Image (cartoon, coloured by chain):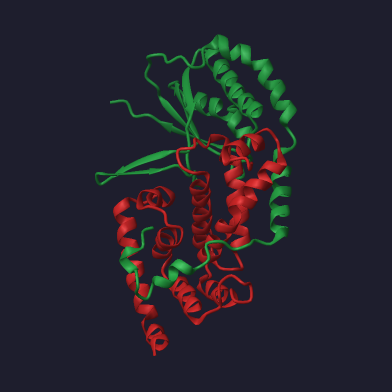
Chain colours: A green, B red
């Protein structure tokens, strides 16, 4: 209990205020219906994609880190209405991105990238703040790409599966010093 | 024995709708009270729905570094903030209406002191109200509040202190009346 400062004064009644409020029953059904709509649809398709590309991704060494100097950062923002993914869908999604990256690398471009977690550690004015709640506008992932050509970078970013899922990709050229 | 949150989340991710409904029923009353005090009766349903939809979309990435309830709370606060920033209309009137209508809804004991208190809380600026609700009603520690609201611990402490000072000032005449 952290209420010592205002004990026995005007605010002592706060302790008796209700912490709960019953929500209307119709709201629960509305939320569950919306959730089900978003979860249905492409589950089987995603699974098939996962099986097809898993081998390619493995061979391409998706997780390897090659020492090279990138020219572009591709910043990925999530779709505005991202729905929850079941574990096999999540694996399928990762495999799809991996296959795409492997394909880009097979064309002679160096590229690597990762998904970002929802956690953030912000350091401002010497103060460290931790947060774990995703916010609108948060970055969901990134790729680093080596190519000197703007046109190639745009063409590669446009082919990223992230865009097909309703996400946004932003290309940021890297300044070399 | 009731399944715990982690078991329910696993079941939900496996496609079990009833697990989601259990999670919803376990945590919604607190989240709904919070949403009502943040945005009022007109918008609290939308805030709750948005919060649950976003939480459901992100729950496979939840790492259990905090309690699920704390994590869910963050979505309610984020959705309430977004609503406030996107709405030209000030929600204070709605929140004040809720304070008055809680007697009808059986939300509090209907005493003048409770109604005055709810009305005073509704009059706090959002950044003071957020910290006050989390600390003095939900009894979160400043470290958790900082994480939920994305502010530093010092700001949480100072906002709470200012919130209490404003509330005492708002409540002063009524308290004197009740003492007589």
Q: Is residue A54 above or below residue B23?
A: above
Whole-percent x, y for residue A99 in the image: 59, 18
Quadrant where the image shows the N terminus of chain A: bottom left
Tell me what residue is drawn at x 68 percent, y 51 percent: A31
Q: Is residue B167 left or right of residue B2?
A: left
Q: Is residue B144 above or below residue A107?
A: below
Quadrant where the image shows the C terminus of chain A: top left
Tell me what residue is drawn at x 66 percent, y 47 percent: B22
Q: Is residue B83 left or right of residue B130?
A: right
**In this view of the protein, can residue A166 be seen by the observer?**
no
Whole-percent x, y for residue A37 in the image: 73, 43
- Residue B3 picture quarter: top right
Q: Nearer the viewer, residue B5 or A66?
A: B5
Tell me what residue is drawn at x 48 percent, y 48 percent: B70
Whole-percent x, y for residue B134 in the image: 44, 58
Q: Is residue B57 left or right of residue B69?
A: right
Q: Nearer the viewer, residue B111 or A131?
A: B111
Q: Is residue B151 above or below residue A82?
A: below
């Amino acid at each position: 209990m952290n209420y010592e400062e205002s004990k026995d004064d005007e605010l002592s009644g706060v302790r008796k205020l209700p912490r709960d409020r019953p929500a209307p029953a119709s709201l629960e059904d509305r939320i569950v219906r919306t959730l089900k709509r978003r979860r249905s649809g492409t589950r089987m398709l995603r699974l098939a994609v996962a099986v097809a590309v898993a081998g390619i991704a493995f061979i391409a060494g998706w997780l390897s880190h090659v020492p090279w100097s990138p020219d572009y950062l591709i910043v990925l923002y999530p779709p505005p209405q991202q729905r929850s993914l079941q574990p096999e869908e999540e694996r399928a999604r990762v495999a799809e991105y991996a296959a795409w990256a492997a394909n880009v690398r097979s064309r002679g471009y160096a590229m690597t990238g990762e998904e970002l977690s929802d956690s953030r550690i912000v350091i401002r004015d010497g103060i460290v703040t931790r947060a774990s709640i995703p916010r609108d506008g948060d970055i969901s992932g990134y790729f680093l790409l080596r190519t000197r050509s703007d046109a190639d970078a745009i063409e590669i970013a446009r082919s990223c599966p992230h865009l097909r899922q309703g996400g946004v990709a932003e290309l940021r050229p890297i300044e070399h010093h | 024995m009731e399944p715990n949150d982690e078991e329910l989340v696993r079941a939900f991710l496996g496609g079990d709708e009833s697990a989601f409904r259990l999670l919803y029923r376990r945590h919604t009353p607190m989240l709904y009270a919070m949403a009502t005090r943040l945005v009022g009766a007109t918008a609290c349903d939308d805030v709750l729905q948005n919060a649950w939809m976003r939480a459901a979309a992100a729950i496979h990435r939840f790492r259990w570094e905090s309690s699920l309830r704390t994590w869910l709370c963050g979505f309610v606060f984020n959705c309430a903030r977004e609503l406030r920033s996107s709405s030209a209309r000030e929600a204070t009137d709605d929140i004040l209406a809720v304070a008055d209508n809680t007697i009808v809804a059986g939300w509090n004991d209907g005493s003048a002191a409770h109604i005055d208190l709810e009305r005073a809380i509704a009059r706090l600026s959002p950044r003071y109200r957020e910290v006050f609700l989390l600390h003095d009603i939900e009894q979160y520690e400043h470290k958790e509040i900082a994480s939920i609201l994305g502010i530093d611990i010092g700001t949480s402490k100072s906002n709470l202190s200012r919130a209490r000072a404003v509330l005492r000032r708002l409540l002063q005449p009524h308290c004197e009346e009740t003492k007589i």
